[in-house]
Amino acid sequence: MQRLRDLSIRFKVLGLIAMSSFLSLTLAGAAMIVYDLVVFKRTSVDELTVQAQVLGAISSAALIFNDPKAATEYLATLRSRPSIVCAAIYAADGKVFASYQRSDGSGCALPPAQADGNDMLGDDLLLFKGISHNRERVGSIFVRQTLGRTERALGYTGIVAIVLLGALVLGVLVSTAMQRAITKPLLGIAEVARGVTERRDFSLRAVKESNDEVGLMTEAFNQMLAQIERSAAELGRANAQLQVEIGEHRQAREEVVALNATLEQRVAQRTQALELANKELESFSYSVSHDLRTPLRAIEGFSSVLMRDHADRLDERGREHLQRVRAATQRMGRLIDDLLNLARTMRVEVRRRDVKLSDMASSVAKEIGDAHPDRAVHFDIAPNLNADADPQLVRIVLDNLLGNAAKFSSKRNDARVEFGCALQNGERVYYVRDNGVGFDMAYANKLFGAFQRLHSTKEFEGTGIGLANAQRIVARHGGRIWAEGRPGLGATFFFTLPT
Ligand code: ADP
């Protein structure tokens, strides 16, 4: 079945035509032969009957006058018809009166007399016919004739076979012509399809040669090709665009990489320069602060000598001025100390270890209480807080934050300072909270800059270095420090010390 399907259309068309013409011609031929044989037999019966009647009529006198010789002569006239094998005339009593046998010796046995009728024995037709005279039956005649139907059928079969052959040849010729009409456009489509796949040329089109199904197929195929051509063109355009974009992207990336490289180089250079400048600045401020101390000490020393030994020579205003000089000198001394501390913070190495922060905060609180026995600040310190940090540096942070908290809540009688720790997004955040004067959040960023103060010295003593120092220390531990506050409602300072 599969093999049949795989045959080319040409062979299928050929097979179809051959098969149909063979079948129809065979059927027609067979019907014709059968019909001819039937008609032939009937005609033969009729002819033989007439012949027997004629022979019977002329032999009736011989029968009446008992002249078998004459009857035999009449029968001998049958010689002119070689198909008659044998014949006989029977007397009324059924005895053979005269007989005839074909001269070639292939005679036959004569049957006993029978009633009128005919019968077939093989290919031979047997006919009995009564002989009458004046309506009286005087005898009967028998004739046996070979019909030769097999030869006749074979002859016809030969003719049918020749016609069949002719029809087949004609069929092949017709089918070849037809097959060309069917397969040529199909082959054309196949050729175009091959061209399209091999050369990727979507502009090729198959030629439409007819308006039949193949023509419709050619049309559909061409439409499909046109669609593919449009899609391919669009794809090509998109591809080209993509190539351009990829090119631009690559170029941009290369530029970014190049820029990054120079940027990193520049950042490294700048960092190096900045570190150098920082170091120079720090050593400069350190040496300046250091150098300033000597003349400051002299001013302080001489002004205290002046106050002690020569105060009586000065009037009230003079003593007041001298007092101011001394206060300014002391303030400057503290400023220099703070600056030196700040510089030191950046120089010392961070040595981390486990620090008991709660104990440290309690000790700072006690020192603050001792320094201001006149004040009653309530310290609320969370127990068992610890951190992995440099104890000396962390102590400076706590000194500053707790000191500020106490300082900026000094205007209150119920001053409260709280030190604790909370978890924020899984991170430990330490805080120092007070209920002091607070500050405006708009300036929250400025707090940590050196010499930045939100309150005047008249209100609260200070140099503006403490928080800057605390920030540097926290940063050196890899942490952050920030503040929240509201004027009149206190402030909270937060810091982290990641390990
Ligand atoms: P100082 O305390 O010597 O002025 P700091 O650097 O410690 O310097 O603080 C900077 C400024 O931050 C302070 O002058 C003050 O205006 C503000 N500040 C610090 N701590 C607090 C606080 N607990 N409450 C309100 N303001 C504060």
Image (cartoon, rainbow, N blue to C red):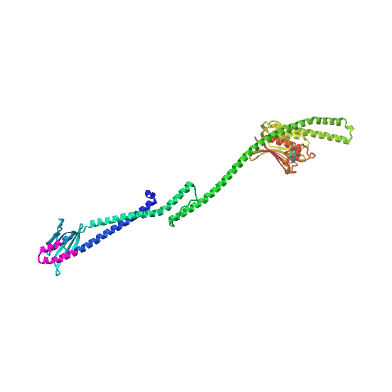
- Look at the image and give the residue range highlighted in magenta: 49-77
Closer to the camera in the image, 198 or 435 = 198
Q: Is residue 230 left or right of residue 282?
A: left
Q: Which quadrant would residue 399 be assigned to in this image?
A: top right
Ligand 1, seen in the image, is in the quarter at top right
Helix, strand or loop for the magenta stretch, by majority: helix
Which residue is rendered at x = 52% and y = 50% of the image?
231
Q: Which quadrant would residue 313 be assigned to in this image?
A: top right
Q: Is residue 253 above or below residue 173?
A: above
Which residue is rendered at x = 83% and y = 34% of the image?
325
Closer to the camera in the image, 211 or 477 = 211
Q: Is residue 10 above or below residue 321?
A: below
Closer to the camera in the image, 5 or 301 = 5
Q: Which quadrant would residue 339 be assigned to in this image?
A: top right
In the image, is residue 293 part of the stretch drawn in magenta? no
| Image coordinates for residue 10, horizontal then vertical, percent | 38, 52
Q: Is residue 343 left or right of residue 68?
A: right
User: Is residue 328 at all visible to an observer of this figure?
Assistant: yes
| Image coordinates for residue 8, horizontal then vertical, percent | 39, 50
In the image, is residue 72 part of the stretch drawn in magenta? yes
Q: Is residue 236 left or right of residue 488?
A: left
User: Is residue 415 at all visible to an observer of this figure?
Assistant: no
| Image coordinates for residue 57, horizontal then vertical, percent | 15, 66
